[in-house]
Image: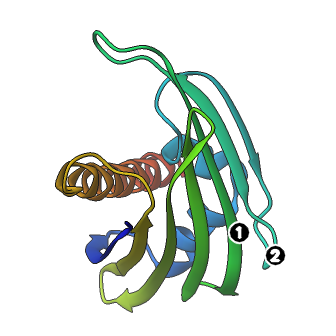
Amino acid sequence: MVLHDTFTISRHLDVPPNEVFTAFADTAIRQRWFRLPGSEASYEHDFRVGGGEMARSTFTGLDTAPERLEYRSRYIDIADAHRIVYSYEAVVDGELRWISLVTVRLEAETDGTRLERTEQVTFLRYAGNGSTDLAHLRGGSVLQLNGLDAALQSGHRRQ
């Protein structure tokens, strides 16, 4: 049995859309806010339609065996400073856990950018009724956008 969900996270960012877009496109900036938890991390990024990302790490939680994490994505549509659409797979210990389609929309606001991130997820493997897995994914997405905001703010202060 599979489990489906869709959720949207909206966020105001204090920089213009082109700076937010650059934080997705520029590998050095992206690595400051996009990373898998754990150690022994590796990362590849090719920001173009048909390109994608590959990230790997080993995560060890409290009282749990280490897990090998893998993230594989493919960019489907990129509309400069307006929209990014990509799909990704989440693999844990060689087992495909979920796949997602993500749309990131960037809209100019008077004092920055409105970012809207919509994710359509299909869990192929999950615990219990899946509510913990869904909460984990949503929470991780919020943390990722917190990291994006921090990377944008730190980059803005340096200029």
Residue drawn 70% across the image and 74% down it: 75
Spot occupied by residue 48 in the image (x, y as percentages of width and height): 79, 74
Spot occupied by residue 82 in the image (x, y as percentages of width and height): 54, 89
**Residue 26 picture quarter:** bottom right
Residue drawn 46% across the image and 77% down it: 16
**139 above or below 66?**
below
Q: Amino acid at mark 2?
A: Gly
Label 1, secondary structure: give it: strand
Quarter of the picture containing the N terminus is bottom left
From the viewer's perspective, tell me whether residue 55 is left or right of residue 104.
Answer: right
**Residue 56 picture quarter:** top right
**Looking at the image, is mark 1 or mark 2 earlier in the sequence?**
2
What residue would you read off at disc 1?
74
From the viewer's perspective, tell me whether residue 79 is left or right of residue 35.
Answer: right
Nearer to me, 10 or 7: 7
Nearer to me, 151 or 43: 43
Spot occupied by residue 93 in the image (x, y as percentages of width and height): 57, 32
What residue would you read off at disc 2?
50
Name of the residue lying farthest toward the front? 1
User: What is the distance, in whole Å, between disc 1 and disc 2 at their CAs?
Assistant: 6 Å
Q: Amino acid at mark 1?
A: Arg
